[in-house]
């Protein structure tokens, strides 16, 4: 054996098991140094798991961790208390499909080719292009078992299926909508009718996936349909906290106050169904002793309004004045804060301080780079990204960061609009290209509710021009087709 007498005595005293190993080494003629090194070599650290929870139409103002004292969201708020809350998180396009494509690819809507929600009728041949790389694809290539459970809404044709975009498993619905109760869901490639609350059913499947993958790295994408309309029916336990609530609601001119309050109570009940199931998920991670090495990212595909600015919905919201039905009249395309702003919570065990608040402006195009940054996976060569890695901010590091986020929305379902926006900490410019008198400029520092449009005012001309120059430069950087159209007129 190639060990000194002193080394052997030390091993016998401090590591009795290794003393026996050395005796075996002597018997088989193996170098003691080699065997001891092999005996004490640490196993490589287990890769972190990732659970990304994406809700549908969830406004940050509906969560306790973002200041709501009437909604009931203790489990979602727990993610903020135990992790980090982003105070200024936005989406670039305030409707479902376009935002979800940006979330998965790190690209803007004109780059993915999905600029509005995908209409289930006339747009059956539209979906996420196979030429684009998603972060689930990258994770799967690095040994992760991946699953999408819940909403897809990025194409229904076979070539657009989630399993063609990096997901090993899909359980849910491909189109824009399903019912909040007794849904039709795809399981193993076939549609099945289920009994029960949709939020519960998709969570049931998520828990099964976690149990089955507990011993290997996994990336679970749990995409709730809630709180998308129709808000109800929900389980009695989700509606019960709000049946007698007199909710605080915006009182824009012309609104039917009781209608807005009814919608708000039902909306809170739908949000509660998410929160209750997030609690089930957190408990399962604890039971399986996975909480310590599982990152949870919680967000929404865009913001939402119930009476704010007199509207109901998101970027294609409907006027709510006059007590109109939920789906009518035609949409009013907008890029208000309420439509663009989303909750973003990240619980990353062992990283950063509990209850961290991050003020930097985050866009959901940052998700791709940030997921890879948190998991320590390099960006694949040749993959174009418009976002940046915010994981150093979660570590408490100070890094150079953008002072503005950009947005674009080309509405073509039930209307027509070509909108572009730049938002800094103090100002927001929104252009409605191809129209007159619809452009907007807001001084967010003094007017966070965006009540006073300063576009075209002499006192803000210099600010407006500076923002326009930056907006145009960004449009040039992504080869925005609207800019070419504007220049050709």
Image (tube, rainbow, N blue to C red):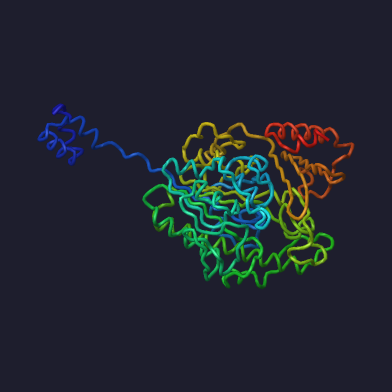
State the residue at coordinates (74%, 48%).
335
Q: Quadrant of the C terminus?
A: top right
x, y percent for residue 406 = 70, 39
Q: Residue, x 24% and y 35% (percent of image)?
A: 38
Rendering coords of residue 178 (x, y %) = 60, 63
Residue extending farthest to the left is 27
**Hey, which quadrant is residue 311 in on the image?**
bottom right
Say which of 352 and 242 sits in front.
242
Which quadrant of the figure contains the N terminus?
A: top left
- Does residue 475 appear in the picture of this structure? yes
**Could you tell whether 227 is left or right of 21 in the image?**
right
The x, y position of residue 379, in whole percent, is: 51, 34
Tally the numbered discs. 0
Residue 31's spot in the image, x, y percent? Answer: 17, 29
Residue farthest to the right?
458
| In this rendering, position of residue 436 left or right of residue 19 | right
Q: What residue is drawn where x is 75% and y is 68%?
A: 259
């Amino acid at each position: 054996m190639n060990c000194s007498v002193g080394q052997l005595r030390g091993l016998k005293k401090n590591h009795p098991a290794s003393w026996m190993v050395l005796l075996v080494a002597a018997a088989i003629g193996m170098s003691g140094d080699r065997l001891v090194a092999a005996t004490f070599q640490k196993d490589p650290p287990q890769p972190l798991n990732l659970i990304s929870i994406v809700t549908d139409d969830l406004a940050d103002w509906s969560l306790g961790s973002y200041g709501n004292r009437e909604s009931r969201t203790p489990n979602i708020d727990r993610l903020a208390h135990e992790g980090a809350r982003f105070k200024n998180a936005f989406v670039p396009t305030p409707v479902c499909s376009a935002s979800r494509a940006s979330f998965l690819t790190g690209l803007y809507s004109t780059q993915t080719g999905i600029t509005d929600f995908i209409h289930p009728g006339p747009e059956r041949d539209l979906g996420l292009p196979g030429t684009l790389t998603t972060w689930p694809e990258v994770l799967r290539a690095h040994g992760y078992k991946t699953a999408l459970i819940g909403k897809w809404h990025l194409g229904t044709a076979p070539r657009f299926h989630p399993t063609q975009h990096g997901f090993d498993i899909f359980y849910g619905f491909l189109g824009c909508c399903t019912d909040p109760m007794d849904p039709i869901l795809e399981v193993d490639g076939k549609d099945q009718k289920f009994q029960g609350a949709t939020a519960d059913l998709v969570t049931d499947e998520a828990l099964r996936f976690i149990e089955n993958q507990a011993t290997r790295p996994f990336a679970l994408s749990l995409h709730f349909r809630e709180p998308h309309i129709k808000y109800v029916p929900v389980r009695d336990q989700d509606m019960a906290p709000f049946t007698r609530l007199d909710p605080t609601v915006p009182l824009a001119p012309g609104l039917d106050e009781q209608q807005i309050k009814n919608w708000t109570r039902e909306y809170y009940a739908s949000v509660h169904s998410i929160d209750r199931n997030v609690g089930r998920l957190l408990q399962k991670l604890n039971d399986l002793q996975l909480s310590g090495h599982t990152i949870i990212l919680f967000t929404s595909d865009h913001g939402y309004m119930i009476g704010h600015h007199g509207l109901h919905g998101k970027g294609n919201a409907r006027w709510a004045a006059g007590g109109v039905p939920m789906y009518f009249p035609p949409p009013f395309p907008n890029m208000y804060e309420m439509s663009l702003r989303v909750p973003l919570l990240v619980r990353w065990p062992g990283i950063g301080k509990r209850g961290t608040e991050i003020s930097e402006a985050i866009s959901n195009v940052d998700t791709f780079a940030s997921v890879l940054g948190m998991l320590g996976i390099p960006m694949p060569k040749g993959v174009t990204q418009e976002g940046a890695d915010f994981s150093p901010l979660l570590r408490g590091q100070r890094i150079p960061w953008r002072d503005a986020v950009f947005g674009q929305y080309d509405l073509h379902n039930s209307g027509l609009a070509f909108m572009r926006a730049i938002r800094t900490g103090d100002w927001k410019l929104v252009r409605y290209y191809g129209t007159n008198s619809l452009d907007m400029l807001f001084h967010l520092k003094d007017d966070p509710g965006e009540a006073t449009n300063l576009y075209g005012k002499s006192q803000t001309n210099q600010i407006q021009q500076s923002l326009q120059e930056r907006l145009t430069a960004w449009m040039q950087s992504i080869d925005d087709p609207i800019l070419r159209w504007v220049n050709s007129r």
